[in-house]
Amino acid sequence: MVEIEAALALIAQGLGPIGSETVSLADAHGRVCAEAITARLDAPPFAVAAMDGYAVRCADFAPGTVMRCLAHAKAGDRHPSVLVPGTCTRIFTGAPVPAGGDAVVLQEDARSEEAGIRFTTAPVPGRHIRLAGCNFRTGDVVVRAGRRLGARDVGLLAAAGHQAVRVHQRPRVAILSTGDELSDRFVTDEEPQIIDANRPALKALVRAWGGVAIDLGIARDCPTALGSAIHGVEADLLVVSGGASVGDFDLVRPTLEGLGLRMAFRRVHMRPGKATMFGTMNGMPVLSLPGNAVAALVSALVFLKPILSALEGAGYEGLAREPAILAHPMTGGGPRNTFLRGRLDRRSDGSQTFTAQPIQDNAMISGLAEANALVLRPAGAPALEAGAPIEAIRFDLIAGF
């Protein structure tokens, strides 16, 4: 049995990006950039007005200055005009600043008179002007390798002159459930049924975390059925749920070992999720999760997410934790590191309180669905009083969970 951090370290050994491809920006959202991308142009290409007003030369100003307005400049003009000394140019946001102009006076600080434009405030050099290249310059790195592209990045790449981008391929994840007791779907008036919740949930997480889910269905509790289910599978990762404990019908480990699985670890010092295994089989990573739904999903959060990040070439910084205080006393920790489900609530002063669910049964997925956070209690942790500080893992900060 290994500790969580040791298990993560073992998983990280040998895992890396699976390949890359070029996609259009329209298909780039959510993908991981495979190389550093540089700007193909300067932005803006010339100095532009940041506000509506008048472009002026600061050197022309003296108390009571009135200037003739000889030109207009608007966004879309391709080339800056030239500012005649002693005059001003009416200018609009995004328009090129006339050559010689070094400030923009806001339109509300100017008034039109018969003799020209009188300014009620003196200009400040550089005020309300965006200099050429202040956004980025040709050759600047605008997106670094390993970054998962959001809408902001897609917009930046477009502004930098790109219509396509090189990204890492999405990992293909084959997902298999095991168990004689499982059904694919509810059928009215049939015998008592236990519906497979793990496979639909794991497929949803794989898609949310950047992978492509391959549904292998349900394998019955016999080595032949399990071997047949995964025979010939072409995937970058195999995820199996169920059959990973030590009962007479828990056949996943011996069956996979018979097919060539090299085990990195077979149990983790955590609850739920003790019966989590990881290894490689003929070069393909294999993650085996417990059959109970809560244990399977918590283990997926801890282990499947970083595996997918590694296969996609994205950096992984672990599960973010936020400070909170206990709403109620908490008993001492058990013999394993324990993830407690519960709810975070925000108080009027902005602080958060955590209330652990009274029932922490590993098979009760309804409780996990009602929770909005986890708290990890180390093995043997002391009892805590209400008001004690803790750290919580918020579900709303985890894509798709």
Image (cartoon, helix red, strand yellow):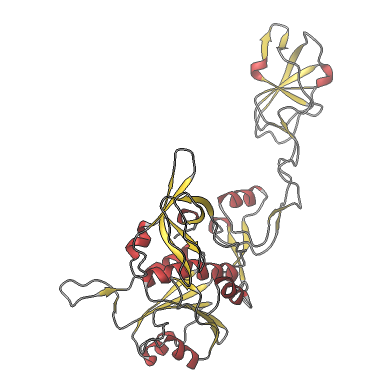
Position of 286 relative to 293 (above/below):
below
Q: Is residue 25 left or right of residue 186?
A: right
Residue in the image at 74% along x and 30% along y = 97
Residue in the image at 72% along x and 15% along y = 121
- x then y, percent, for residue 29: 54, 56
Q: Check the image and name the residue furthest to the left.
A: 189
Position of 215 relative to 331 (above/below):
below
What is the quadrant of residue 66 in the picture? Answer: top right
For the C terminus, give its image quadrant: bottom left
Position of 1 relative to 311 (above/below):
below
- x then y, percent, for residue 257: 49, 90
Along the line of sight, the residue nearer the viewer: 171 or 385: 385
Along the line of sight, the residue nearer the viewer: 383 or 326: 383
User: Number of numbered discs present?
Assistant: 0
What is the quadrant of residue 11 in the picture? Answer: bottom right
Along the line of sight, the residue nearer the viewer: 72 or 26: 26
- x then y, percent, for residue 103: 76, 25
Position of 70 relative to 21 (above/below):
above
Residue in the image at 47% along x and 49% along y = 387
Along the line of sight, the residue nearer the viewer: 264 or 16: 264
Does residue 206 appear in this view? no
